[in-house]
Image (cartoon, helix red, strand yellow):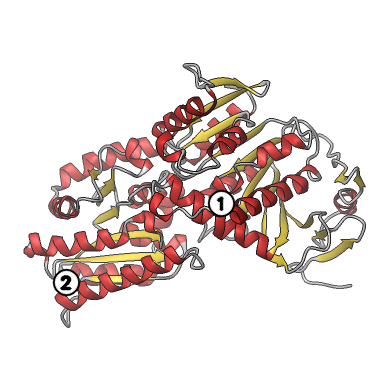
């Protein structure tokens, strides 16, 4: 059967329930090795024996990133893809394809190899996945971990599906491991119980977990009836990583409040017969790469920047997913207050907000979209004229390369989430700036990045007038002060870049310090 290089050859093993995809240009040896994974023993696939591979990295996240094109990928996808490209390994995540019915409990997986990276897309039952993802993960854990108890929705069927999907991930992964030397790196709140599920299957590998979102303080965390089980799940890992020291402290206090386990000064505790290390690993970006992208801005971005220069307009930019944790309506209200409190900025500044769609099946996200559109319309209706539109609002995904150019062309970066694990847009804004004429970052004190980026203008996003005044200060800040602040910020984000995040976490996971 002849096919183009972009096509794949599908083989289905009826005995295993695995769907294995072999790229047509793979060697016979690779094909046979992939086929070995379909042989089962005791309900699990026999481990594949891959020669001369030490400490292979195995990454698990809710969804696979598009490693062919990272131009629209978030921080997790870019960081994981780089780690796997460096070391080689496997990335397991849920497929975009779902099963309408479950004919078997055996995992159904699509495998594909791209250079040194093998991806495994796990096909899951549609209804069960929705209850896990839209239900427990994003209607229970997401608002809870972002301090929004008023939006938490506890339902027994949500929790049941969450644990069942994690069990399915564990069963699939157990059949893909090549031995006890594989380092297993599990990502984010969707998969908190996965380590415990793997331990139940007898997996003794080193397993690490990294939380990309905040961890709430004990009094909020205890609001979920499942908090004791979640703490028990987290104590099954060898390494538990967080974005900030605040999150680490909240986790340790919650552990102590739940089962009296205490951590030593190095962040280690004894639990379940192993040493559990809890530590801060602030995620970063590839600063030089993003700076190059920003410098090579698309032609239409350059033309728009030149037009604003001719008109004497300065641009304020916000780049976010459309999520209630990002504080977007309050940010637009702050821009409106800027125009009221600083009328000299009328027809002198414009605000560009890019808000990409996310989780639109969850009602809270539809509500925030309606609120945001109403606020943008009200501000423009009050202030706009034929030559000036105060707010430009884009509700779609924009390629990362194009975002880099837009960030560079903006005199103020407005990053004001109500609560955020890190917020890489803050670091991308800094990296994108022209060192000779940099813009100013206005940053929420409730973004994880605020622990690192003290030279930005730190604001309380709930205080609309404070944000408005900070924007005004940024718009008129002298060049020498902007250069000094930017230089200090660049130095810090280069020190804590994406490579350092990967190196530090994987060193801890390997037990190397």
Position of residue 483 measured from the top left corner of the image (x, y, whole percent) = 22, 43
Tell me which label, 1 or 2, sits earlier in the chain.
1
In the rendered image, the vertical position of residue 28 relative to residue 125, given as above or below: above
Q: Secondary structure at mark 1?
A: helix
Residue 295, can we see it? Answer: no
- Is residue 477 found left or right of 220 in the rendered image? left
Position of residue 278 measured from the top left corner of the image (x, y, whole percent) = 52, 28
How far apart in space, not on screen, are marks 1 and 2 (Cα)?
39 Å
Position of residue 461 measured from the top left corner of the image (x, y, whole percent) = 25, 50
Residue 55, can we see it? Answer: yes
Residue at image mark 2: 311
- Is residue 248 found left or right of 389 in the rendered image? right
Residue at image mark 1: 77
- Mark 2 nearby-residue class (10 Å; few <14, some 14–19, many ≥20): few
Q: Secondary structure at mark 2?
A: helix
Q: Residue at x 17, y 83 (%)?
A: 386
- Is residue 260 found left or right of 405 in the rendered image? right
Closer-to-camera residue (271/259) = 259
Q: Residue at x 47, y 27 (%)?
A: 257
Asked which quadrant contains residue 489, the reply is top left
- Of the residues tagged 1 and 2, which is closer to the observer? 1
Q: Quadrant of the N terminus?
A: bottom right
């Amino acid at each position: 059967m002849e096919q183009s290089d972009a096509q794949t050859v599908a083989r289905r093993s009826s005995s295993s329930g695995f769907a294995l995809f072999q790229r047509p240009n793979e060697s016979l040896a690779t094909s046979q090795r992939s086929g070995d994974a379909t042989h089962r023993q005791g309900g699990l696939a026999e481990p594949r024996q891959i020669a001369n591979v030490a400490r292979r990295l195995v990454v698990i996240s809710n969804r696979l990133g598009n490693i062919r094109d990272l131009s629209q990928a978030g921080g997790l996808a870019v960081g994981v893809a780089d780690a796997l490209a460096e070391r080689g390994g496997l990335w397991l995540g849920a497929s975009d394809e779902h099963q309408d019915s479950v004919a078997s409990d055996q995992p159904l997986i699509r495998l594909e190899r791209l250079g040194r990276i093998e991806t495994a897309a796990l096909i899951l039952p549609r209804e069960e996945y929705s209850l896990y993802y839209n239900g427990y993960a994003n209607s229970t854990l997401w608002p809870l971990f972002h301090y929004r108890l008023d939006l938490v929705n506890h339902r027994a069927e949500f929790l049941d599906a969450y644990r069942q999907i994690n069990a399915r991930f564990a069963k699939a992964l157990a059949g893909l491991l090549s031995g006890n030397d594989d380092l297993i790196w599990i990502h984010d709140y969707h998969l908190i119980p996965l380590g415990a599920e793997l331990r139940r299957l007898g997996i003794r590998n080193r397993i690490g977990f990294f939380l990309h979102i905040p961890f709430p303080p004990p009094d909020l965390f205890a609001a979920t009836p499942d908090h004791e089980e979640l703490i028990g799940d987290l104590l099954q890992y060898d390494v538990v990583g967080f974005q900030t020291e605040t999150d680490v402290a909240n986790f340790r206090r919650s552990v102590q409040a739940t089962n009296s386990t205490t951590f030593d000064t190095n962040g280690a505790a004894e639990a379940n017969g192993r040493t559990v290390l809890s530590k801060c690993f602030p995620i970063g970006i590839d600063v030089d790469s993003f700076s190059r992208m920003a410098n090579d801005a698309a032609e239409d971005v350059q033309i728009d920047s030149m037009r604003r220069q001719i008109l004497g307009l300065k641009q304020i930019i916000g780049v976010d997913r459309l999520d209630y944790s990002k504080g977007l309506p309050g940010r637009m209200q702050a821009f409106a207050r800027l125009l009221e409190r600083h009328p000299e900025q009328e027809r002198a500044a414009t605000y560009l907000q890019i808000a990409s769609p996310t989780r639109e099946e969850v009602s809270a996200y539809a509500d925030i979209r309606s609120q945001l559109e109403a606020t943008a319309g009200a501000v423009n209706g009050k202030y706009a004229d034929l030559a000036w539109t105060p707010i430009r609002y884009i509700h779609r995904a924009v390629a990362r390369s194009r975002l880099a150019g837009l960030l560079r062309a903006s005199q103020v970066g407005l990053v004001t989430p109500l609560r955020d694990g890190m917020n890489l847009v803050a670091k991308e804004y800094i990296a994108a700036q022209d060192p000779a004429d940099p813009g100013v970052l206005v940053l929420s004190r409730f973004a994880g990045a605020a622990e690192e980026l003290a030279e930005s203008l730190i604001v309380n996003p709930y205080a609309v007038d404070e944000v408005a005044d900070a924007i005004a200060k940024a718009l008129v800040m002298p060049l020498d002060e902007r250069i000094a602040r930017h230089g200090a910020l660049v130095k810090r984000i280069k020190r804590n870049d994406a490579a350092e995040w990967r190196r530090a976490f994987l060193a801890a996971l390997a037990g190397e310090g």
